[in-house]
Image (cartoon, coloured by chain):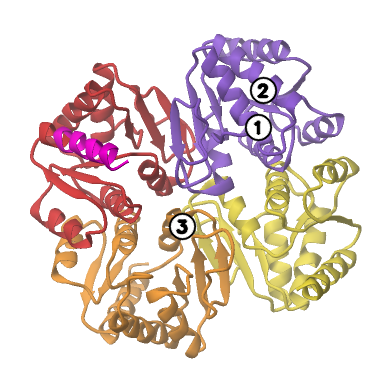
Chain colours: A red, B purple, C yellow, D orange
Amino acid sequence: MGPGDRASGSICEVAYHLGRAIAEQGWTVLTGGRAVGVMQAASQGAKVAGGLVIGILPEGDRAQASPDLDVVIVTGMGQARNVINILSSDVVVACGMGAGTASEVSLALKAQKPVVLLQYDATSEAFFQSLAVAPLVAASTVGEAIGWINGYFQEQNLAL
Amino acid sequence: MGPGDRASGSICEVAYHLGRAIAEQGWTVLTGGRAVGVMQAASQGAKVAGGLVIGILPEGDRAQASPDLDVVIVTGMGQARNVINILSSDVVVACGMGAGTASEVSLALKAQKPVVLLQYDATSEAFFQSLAVAPLVAASTVGEAIGWINGYFQEQNLAL
Amino acid sequence: MGPGDRASGSICEVAYHLGRAIAEQGWTVLTGGRAVGVMQAASQGAKVAGGLVIGILPEGDRAQASPDLDVVIVTGMGQARNVINILSSDVVVACGMGAGTASEVSLALKAQKPVVLLQYDATSEAFFQSLAVAPLVAASTVGEAIGWINGYFQEQNLAL
Amino acid sequence: MGPGDRASGSICEVAYHLGRAIAEQGWTVLTGGRAVGVMQAASQGAKVAGGLVIGILPEGDRAQASPDLDVVIVTGMGQARNVINILSSDVVVACGMGAGTASEVSLALKAQKPVVLLQYDATSEAFFQSLAVAPLVAASTVGEAIGWINGYFQEQNLAL
């Protein structure tokens, strides 16, 4: 998850590497589906690595869909689709921050989903840590994010 | 699309063959995702044929998901997910009829999506034909349904 | 519930009298909220009679809202708001028929809500009776509809 | 908007006074509708002052509804109803903070709705100010919140 129209070039570059790294792990990438910003970069990175890429569109048709999606889910529900993004994910990685992304991180914590903050600022991290209702970690690099997720999955398996 | 808990054995058998035939065409199968009735049978048939199977769940978690899904979309939105089923599909095939399925056929016609009725009764066919706002065809067999869809796709390409 | 842009003048006239009669009973009128067709006529009729009128809009703002609403609920969810119309109602009256209205009647039956068909045709009545999963009645006049609803409410109280 | 089950007594007290003050201005109170925490306290305060109180429930029935609602909207959409809370409001007041409330403030900023933070902490204020995409103010008291909203409405009228 991450900003769309307002995403900077450097955040998109991280998102591209994140999508690629997730696909290389054999995991599925799920984004908000639009052909802009972090959604587009992560989808493209995952596609390059041969991963399965799912997009959950806010619009009622596919006109804004990323060309790199394998599965296009058309909701016609605007930002209400953010809830679907979260509930359909095992782990939520937020790359960059904005109002839409903040709603997704908040909904993830509400739904007790683990969250990784990437390309975060101290203010965002402090705020989401203060909500403290689900596992939340701030990662400095894509590699650190992937490492944390792997550890989380292993813990879950052990716990089960 | 088709009944869940109330689906008869014979309707599920047709749904299985439908799922299989769709996958054999190289098309993606999208269902309501639950492990019962037409949703389960169509997912299983598609899976056997090596197809990509997407399920859009009404629940907020995966407890009721069919084991044959490749992509599980968790909405937590109850019957509002029927709209997503429709908007995400190129063609809607209704196999059998019930209140939920009727809502999906109605929403498909509202959204101008083509609809194929399979395992239909005369009353259902007469009703949906009377709404007459999008292409609607009643097919007697899975083969006839697939044939009609192929024809529809060819027409669309020609028209474009 | 009833057609919007496609509603005929005579159906709108019935909807106006229906909205008025519902308000005169002291009941709340809930519609799809738009300023067209049955939604507008029923809202106007209810307003004239001093009733409380709620509209559940599919759009993400109020630009299409009926001027006769007391409460405007903005969903931005398109036809997914049809589910909210149904779940928020005690009794669903369908005045006229179209694809959107058919989805609402279907969703009402799915949710076990009682349905009154007004300005119905024989094909619609036969179809919805065939689904047969919740109380459904076809009324010839507004008075008959109101009478049936009153009887239904009395029965429910007795049953409770 | 504000926490439900996790709301402290002092936050609920402020919410009660806020609901009361909003109703005394002749404005409508809209909450998440449940009979707990800030939602319940604000609804009760508004009801005592004779205001119109609307609740947008996440559940699919009214079992959890506040007894102080005049209008009960049943969505069955879980946290996706947060979007409706925001889109249906002219101004969003967040009283206290939690994951659900954070999603609502974020969605409000995304939708360009003005937000008043009440019973806020410095971390929350700093975070939402950093998103900076719509008018946002932190108020120390209910009176200050009401004053800011009145000023905002006057500005809007002048601008129009």
Residue, disc 3:
D81
Label 3 chain ID: D
Which percent across, then down, holds residue D21? 38, 86
The magenta stretch is A146-160
In this orientation, which residue lies closer to the viewer: B159 or C19?
C19
Residue B2's label in the rendered image is none
Residue, disc 1:
B37
Which residue shows up at 69% across the image and 13% down it?
Answer: B148
- Identify which amino acid the numbered label 2 is placed on: Ala
Q: Is residue D16 above or below residue B152?
A: below
Residue, disc 2:
B15
Q: Is residue A147 magenta?
A: yes
Count residues near mark 1 (Cα–Cα under 10 Å), then give few for <14, some for 14-19, many for 20+: many
Which residue shows up at 88% across the image and 68% down it?
Answer: C143
- Identify which amino acid the numbered label 3 is placed on: Arg
Q: CA distance from mark 1 to mark 2?
A: 9 Å
Count residues near mark 2 (Cα–Cα under 10 Å), then give few for <14, some for 14-19, many for 20+: many
Q: Secondary structure at mark 1?
A: helix
Which mark is nearer the camera, 3 or 1? 1
